[in-house]
Image (cartoon, rainbow, N blue to C red):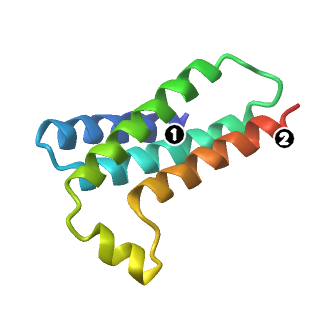
């Protein structure tokens, strides 16, 4: 139950940051919310009710990461340094969800 409350808090914060066009912070809170959901999904073996919610979270995460990427002027420097970009960080979280779904079969 606490994870659900944390997830709701992160959702509200993400909406607030997106409204202010602070996509960097929105991406951070959206990523945290998706990671919390990932832990919840891992505990829901053989239950498929959360798949629709997962789809929405993944879609929102991708949109926020894309918006954060568009405002990133240091993207080329990050690539040259070998640090993960915002899209790569979002992809890692999405892959975590995929691994849970694949392991559940």
In the rendered structure, the answer to whether residue 71 lies left or right of residue 20 reads right
Residue placed under numbered mark 1 in the picture: 2
Q: CA distance from mark 1 to mark 2?
A: 25 Å
**In terms of image quadrants, where is residue 63?**
top left
Location of residue 97 in the rendering, given as x and y in whole percent from the top left corner:
65, 42
Task: Give the percent coordinates (x, y) of residue 47.
Answer: 76, 21
Residue drawn at (20%, 65%) of the image: 73
**Mark 2: few/some/many CA within 10 Å (<14, 14-19, 20+):** few
85 shown above or below 77: above
Left or right of 84, for residue 23: left
Who's the residue at 40% across and 80% down the image?
80
Q: Residue at x 19, y 54 (%)?
A: 71
Residue 37, x across and y down, in percent: 56, 38
Q: Quadrant of residue 105?
A: top right
Q: Are marks 1 and 2 in contact (CB under 8 Å)?
A: no
> Is residue 105 found left or right of 85 in the rendered image?
right
Q: Mark 1: which secondary structure?
A: helix
User: Which residue is outermost to the right?
Assistant: 105
Specify which label sits upstream in the sequence, 1 or 2.
Answer: 1
The location of residue 52, given as percent across then percent down, is: 58, 18
Q: Quadrant of the N terminus?
A: top right
Task: Give the foreground label among 1 and 2.
Answer: 2
Height in image: 16 above or below 86?
A: above
**Residue 15 falls in image quadrant:** top left
Q: Is residue 39 visible?
A: no
For mark 2, give the secondary structure: helix
Q: Which mark is residue 24?
A: none
Location of mark 2 (residue): 103
Residue 20 in view (yes/no): yes
């Amino acid at each position: 139950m606490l994870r659900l409350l944390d997830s709701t808090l992160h959702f509200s914060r993400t909406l607030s940051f997106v409204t202010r066009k602070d996509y960097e912070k929105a991406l951070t809170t959206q990523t945290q919310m998706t990671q919390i959901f990932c832990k919840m999904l891992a505990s829901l073996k053989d239950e498929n009710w959360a798949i629709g919610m997962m789809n929405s979270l993944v879609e929102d995460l991708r949109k926020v990461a894309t918006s954060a990427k568009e405002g990133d002027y240091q993207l080329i420097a990050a690539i040259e340094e070998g640090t993960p970009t915002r899209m790569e960080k979002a992809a890692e979280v999405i892959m975590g969800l995929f691994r849970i779904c694949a392991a559940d079969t």
